[in-house]
């Protein structure tokens, strides 16, 4: 039996407040529009969805299936070489990342410090206690065109403030606030832009 999450009562309010930020309306960047329409809002049935749904029934999941499926689509689009998963209970999410890019090398670091000079080009962080410090450690070793994903950016005022600081970081060029997730691209050739997305 699923536990009731009181934050689910807040979901309709968030959706109404973000209504005009859906499906890429008003987005003029081809990069951002493609990401929003073909990754965030993709409604097709991916080859790995059914086998992974079976896995979800047998293993403890750290986040919703909706967000794990988004991770699969994002990894499939970005095709990273080295991925670091930070935080507890990332096992099922790891399976979605593996399904999105079979050639990616994936490391799990728990809630510790990121290994230095590893050249990770993708970070997934589950509710970090200090999101800005984690992003700075990632950005210090990440190549150009890397991407960082933070879960729980609006779970508290402190995390929202950290997310805002991450968006202001010199290496953060294009950011997407999906309420449940924050996605940061480190693409130096793109114009700096911050997008609010009703996901």
Image: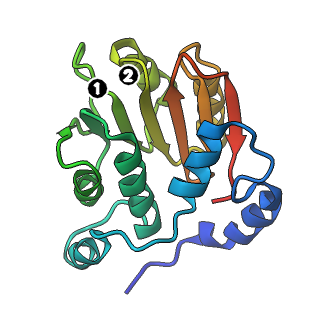
Residue at the limit of the structure toward the front, as seen here: 30
The number of discs equals 2
User: How far is disc 2 from disc 1 in space, using C-alphas?
Assistant: 7 Å
Would you call the spot at circle 1 few (<14 residues within 10 Å), some (14-19), or many (20 or more)? many
Q: Which quadrant of the figure contains the C terminus?
A: bottom right
| Residue 149 appears anywhere in the view | yes
Q: Earlier in the sequence, mark 2 or mark 1?
A: 1
Q: Which element type, helix, strand or loop, lies under badge 2?
A: helix
| Residue 155 appears anywhere in the view | no
**Residue depicted at 24% across the width and 13% down the height:** 117
Q: Are marks 2 and 1 in contact (CB under 8 Å)?
A: yes
Q: Which element type, helix, strand or loop, lies under badge 1?
A: loop
Specify whether 59 is left or right of 139.
left
Vertical order, 160 against 137 (above or below):
below
Percent of width and height locating residue 115: 22, 21
- Name the mark on residue 138: 2
Q: Which quadrant of the figure contains the N terminus?
A: bottom left
Specify whether 41 is left or right of 56.
right
* Displayed quadrant of residue 93: bottom left
- Name the mark on residue 120: 1
Vertical order, 188 against 84 (above or below):
above
Percent of width and height locating residue 86: 31, 38
Question: Could you say which is closer to the camera, residue 114 or residue 83?
Answer: 83
**Residue depicted at 40% across the width and 53% down the height:** 71
**Residue depicted at 75% across the width and 39% down the height:** 28
Question: Could you say which is closer to the camera, residue 12 or residue 193?
Answer: 193
Question: Could you say which is closer to the camera, residue 122 or residue 136?
Answer: 122
**Residue depicted at 56% across the width and 17% down the height:** 189
């Amino acid at each position: 039996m699923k536990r009731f999450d009181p934050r689910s009562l807040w979901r309709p309010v968030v959706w109404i407040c973000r209504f005009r930020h859906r499906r890429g309306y008003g987005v003029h960047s081809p990069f951002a529009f493609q990401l929003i329409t073909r990754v965030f809002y993709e409604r097709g049935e991916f080859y790995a969805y059914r086998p992974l749904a079976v896995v979800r029934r047998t293993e403890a999941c750290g986040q919703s299936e909706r967000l794990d499926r988004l991770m699969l689509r994002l990894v499939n689009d970005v095709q990273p070489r080295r991925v670091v998963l930070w935080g507890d209970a990332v096992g099922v999410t790891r399976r979605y990342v593996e399904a999105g890019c079979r050639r990616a090398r994936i490391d799990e670091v728990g809630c510790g410090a990121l290994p230095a000079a590893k050249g990770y080009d993708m970070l997934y962080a589950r509710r970090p206690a200090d999101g800005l410090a984690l992003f700075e450690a990632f950005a210090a070793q990440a190549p150009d065109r890397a991407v960082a994903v933070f879960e729980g950016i609006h779970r508290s005022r402190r995390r929202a403030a950290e997310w805002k600081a991450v968006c202001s970081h010199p290496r953060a060029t294009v950011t997407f606030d999906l309420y449940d997730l924050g996605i940061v691209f480190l693409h130096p050739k793109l114009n700096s832009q911050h997008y609010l997305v009703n996901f």
